Amino acid sequence: MSGLPDQPHDPESDGQPTEGGPWFRDGLGFRCTSCGNCCTGPPGAVWFERAESEAMAKALELDHETFLRTYTRRVGGRLSLRERHTRHGFDCIFLDRESRPGKALCRIYRERPSQCRTWPFWSENLSSPEDWERAREQTPCPGMGCSDPDALIPAETIVERLRESREADRRLAEQAD
Ligand code: SF4
Ligand code: SF4
């Protein structure tokens, strides 16, 4: 899955606000177009915590063990959501390209893990404008850089998502120790 690293983000990586505010202090344009590009691409991983897999299992009306056996796999000793190799790339197992023609939707949208909920406001994407641009181009994510004024995400919200992403990474790293 592009945009989704095969290791949890480095919780100590850059993106901290500097004097005068972070480089994104005026906010960033972002509106998801449901293209699905961040849920596919080269092989990757979608990490999740126990509470998240329990929530996903519940949403699918499965017991936890059945969910883990059916929808997850081990990657480097950790559990990730599975992928399916399609003509688009390695799609997340929950990516739905059928329900709405031309759109790629998440089957477990309400219960998607923190890694997905915080995209694209990850440390590695927010370290600098160049990193933001790199992520936008490499994914590619047509929602990043959306110029509609209504799509402007304020800096406070970005910082909140960044914090959520970092905290989830930290917990995942601790679980792996
Ligand atoms: S790549 Fe960007 S626009 Fe496409 S689904 Fe992901 S977040 Fe939305
Ligand atoms: S869980 Fe949903 S949002 Fe996350 S990668 Fe899979 S399809 Fe995309």
Image (cartoon, helix red, strand yellow):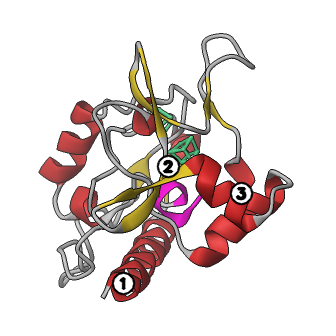
Q: In the rendering, at what x and y percent does residue 132 appear?
A: 24, 49
Q: Which residue is mark 3?
A: 66
Q: Which residue is mark 2?
A: 152
Which residue range is magenta in the image? 112-117
The mark that comes first in sequence, 2 or 1, is: 2
What's the amino acid at mark 3? Thr
Front of the two marks 3 and 1:
3
Question: For the point 26% across and 56% down, which residue is it?
Answer: 125
Q: In the rendering, at what x and y percent does residue 126 appear?
A: 26, 61
Of residue 151 and residue 11, the one placed in the foreground of this image is 11
What's the amino acid at mark 1? Arg
Q: Are marks 2 and 1 in contact (CB under 8 Å)?
A: no
Q: Which residue is mark 1?
A: 170
Q: Are marks 2 and 3 in contact (CB under 8 Å)?
A: no
Asked which secondary structure carries label 2, the reply is strand
Q: Residues within 10 Å of mark 2 (few under 14, many from 20)?
A: some
In space, the residues marked 2 and 3 are separated at their CA atoms by 40 Å
Reply above or below: 130 against 17: above
Looking at the rendering, in which quadrant would you find the N terminus?
A: top left
